[in-house]
Amino acid sequence: YQNALIKWANVINYNKSFKAKHNLGLLAGTELLKTDYESMGATGEGFTSKDLMQLGIAAIPTGVTGTKSQYALFSLFGEAKYNFMSKYYLSGSVRRDGSTAFGPDNRYGTFWGASAAWNLVNESFMKSVKKIDQLKIRASVGTSGNDRIGDFLFLSTYNLGSYGDLTSSFPATPANPLLKWESNFNYNIGLDFGFFNNRLTGSVEYYNKKTSDLLFPVALSYTSGFSSQTQNIGEMVNKGVEVELRV
């Protein structure tokens, strides 16, 4: 088999401090990920010896198989970060992804994120507190996408093979041109802390993740000739509180 992976990325960074108080960071870039997989195989029966198992000397060739798949993801992204005297932090990001998993009308998705944090230990009113080494309140919100569903499922595809000594083809998957990105909306609020020269550290966080347009195989009537079809269906929410302590 042959499996080729091409990854191409360009990133530019800019960092600047102003008056020893304001710190700014900017990032922009592009990325391309492309895979090309191809395999072939053959089987045979009737070998003269277990030490001579080359396919060319098989008495009865029994089959030949082969497959080919391709996938590509192209992304444009940018990010901005700012902090004031290492006390107050703000950041924002945006990216636009195009995936060959979807048809031309739904190929691209735009996703974003924003976050803020307050580092209390650098405030003047905390200087007199000797046993607290780390205390930060943080929050973030943003979206993300999922395209991991397989190749060409928006198209009606066919399997090619043989029947007797003739070439044959038959339907493999039903077309779904409406397929689009599965999207996630996430937000969380957390507190990071450290005590006694950071001998005891940890965090408390509330998180909420809502997934919409779930990509999932839906059962079809066998009279259609297919058992299932990948569709965007329903939504799911995952939320809770997470506590972590490290000693």
Image (cartoon, rainbow, N blue to C red):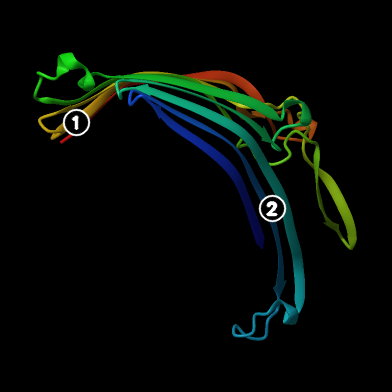
Q: Which residue is mark 2?
A: 36
x and y percentages locating residue 228 in the rendered image:
69, 32
Q: Is residue 217 left or right of residue 67?
A: left
- The amino acid type, in three-letter code, at marker 2 is Asp
Q: Residues within 10 Å of mark 1 (few under 14, many from 20)?
A: some
Q: Identify the residue at horizontal 87%, vertical 53% (top origin).
A: 168
As measured in the structure, the alpha-carbon distance from the residue carrying label 1 to the one carrying label 2 is 46 Å
Q: Identify the residue at horizontal 22%, vertical 17% (top origin).
A: 123
- The amino acid type, in three-letter code, at marker 1 is Thr
Q: Is residue 92 left or right of residue 147?
A: left
x and y percentages locating residue 54 in the rendered image:
68, 80
Q: Identify the residue at horizontal 68%, vertical 26% (top origin).
A: 180
Tag 1 secondary structure: strand
Q: Which residue is mark 1?
A: 201
- Compared to 49, does 112 lie above or below? above
Tag 2 secondary structure: strand
Q: Residue furthest right?
A: 166
**Residue 238 shows up from this direction:** no
Q: Earlier in the sequence, mark 1 or mark 2?
A: 2
x and y percentages locating residue 62 in the rendered image:
75, 68
Q: Nearer the viewer, residue 92 or 141?
A: 92
